[in-house]
Image (spheres, rainbow, N blue to C red):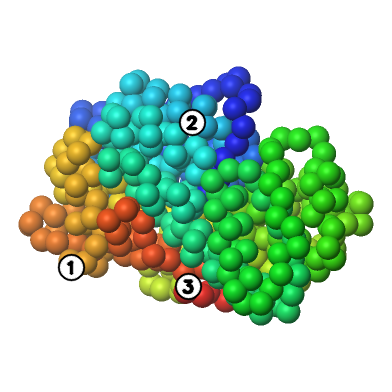
Amino acid sequence: MIHSSLRGLAGLVTAAAITFGASAAHADVTVGALMPLTGPLGEYGESSLNGVRLAAKEISQSGGILDGPLNIAVGDTQTNPQAGVLAAKQLIATNKVAGLIGPLASGVTIPVAQSVTSVSAIPQISSASTAPTITTLDDKDFLFRSTPHDALQGVVLGDVVRDAGYAKVAVVYVNNDYGKGLADAFSARFAKLGGAITASIAYEEKQASYRGELTQAAKGGPEALALIGYPGDGVPMLKQAIEEGLFSRFIFTDGMKSLDMTKAIPAKYLEGSVGTSPEAQDSEAKKRFEAAYEASYGKKPPLPFIDTAYDATYLLALAIEKAGSTDGAKVRDALRPIANPPGEPILPGEWAKAKQLIAEGKDIDYVGAAGSQNFDAAGDVPGTFGVWTVKGGEITTLKIVEP
């Protein structure tokens, strides 16, 4: 998904092993979770980590991975590329992880892939990095993702905004791979449908004021502001747009599907806004995951990337089990066979079934909580998107669409 500046390296790494009910006599397998527990994406870090923890608990309590527990070592990326790279290096050097889940931010994922995982031959599955540039990244085929990319989301967003009746829209986007990629994809689709982009303004993170960018975006008579960012900067920006009377109608993407936003901004200003975010269609896999999540953590919040983090954990663990090893290249080479057809479908929570089939030498096909997890040659997956709005201060999904 996203990127941040190179400031704020205090408290760089929080690496903590999480073990789920297995004997210490086993040779444990550890995977790393690179999560933004702090920084502009901090709201999504802990919720995504719950998806990872849930998968690890199910695996450890249903026969284990290579007959031992699945441990999770956590590194805080701070939504910061430099911090993310250092956290990844520490997880590999100190915790001896067999693979990495994350990061959530495209601008963190890319340098981690280029300078850490592709060099160390460690498989990496990002559960939230959606920048189109990742598709062609030279990552030695060690980078995968369990969420669809923004070339698809941009098309969906363009359709949604035009269907909502907007003819002229201004765009303000975070100045990184995520923001620019999604802004470009949306703008191209909206223009193709006859809409006009009156301004497209990049912003830098962690500023005290965004009034300059907002004033510039308000020129040309736009009917609404499309804000492509995330809560750490997006909430202050919305407040300033409202205070200055520059915008009263808003369009959002996955990075602003935020409970922090709905708590901080009066409901009347968000009522009827439209947004898009990766979201699975109703399915048995989705129902099983949500029931398991609720049993462990309570009702799942309407935040993105919890299910994709769960899927990334299952995919990595299944690949390790199939490879019969934690060797990075062997695990990488097992990812497509366990994720793609043909094979016996494996739903969320069916670890024991998958483990038995693998032991019997049979093919499996993991069916994701977040939707299809069939990896293509670039390590990308297809996907569906939820169209969401805010009603009465609550985030509500209106429909699920496929690009």
Amino acid type, residue under disc 3 in the picture: Pro
Residue to which mark 1 is pinned? 342
Find the distance from the CA under tag 1 to the CA under tag 2. Answer: 36 Å
Per the image, the residue denoted by label 3 is 403
Q: Secondary structure at mark 2?
A: helix
Q: Which residue corresponds to the image point at 51% horizontal and 75% vertical from the top-left?
A: 401
Q: Is residue 50 left or right of residue 389?
A: left
Position of residue 96 measured from the top left corner of the image (x, y, whole percent)? 30, 26
- Which residue is the site of mark 2? 84
| Residue at left offset 63%, top offset 43% | 175
Q: Secondary structure at mark 1?
A: loop
Crowding at mark 3 (Cα within 10 Å: few <14, some 14-19, many 20+): some
Callout 2: few (<14), some (14-19), or many (20+) C-alpha neighbours within 10 Å?
many
- Where residue 135 appears, as percent x and y from the top left, is 39, 52
Q: Is residue 239 left or right of residue 121?
A: right
Q: Is residue 18 visible?
A: no
The residue positioned 42% from the left and 48% from the top of the image is 134
Q: Residue furthest left?
A: 360
Identify whether 147 is placed above or below 281. Answer: above
The residue closer to the viewer here, 40 or 298, is 40
Q: Earlier in the sequence, mark 3 or mark 1?
A: 1
> Which amino acid type is shown beneath numbered disc 2?
Gly
Residue 188 vertical position relative to residue 318 in the rendered view, above or below:
below
Q: Residue 294: image x %, image y %? A: 50, 58
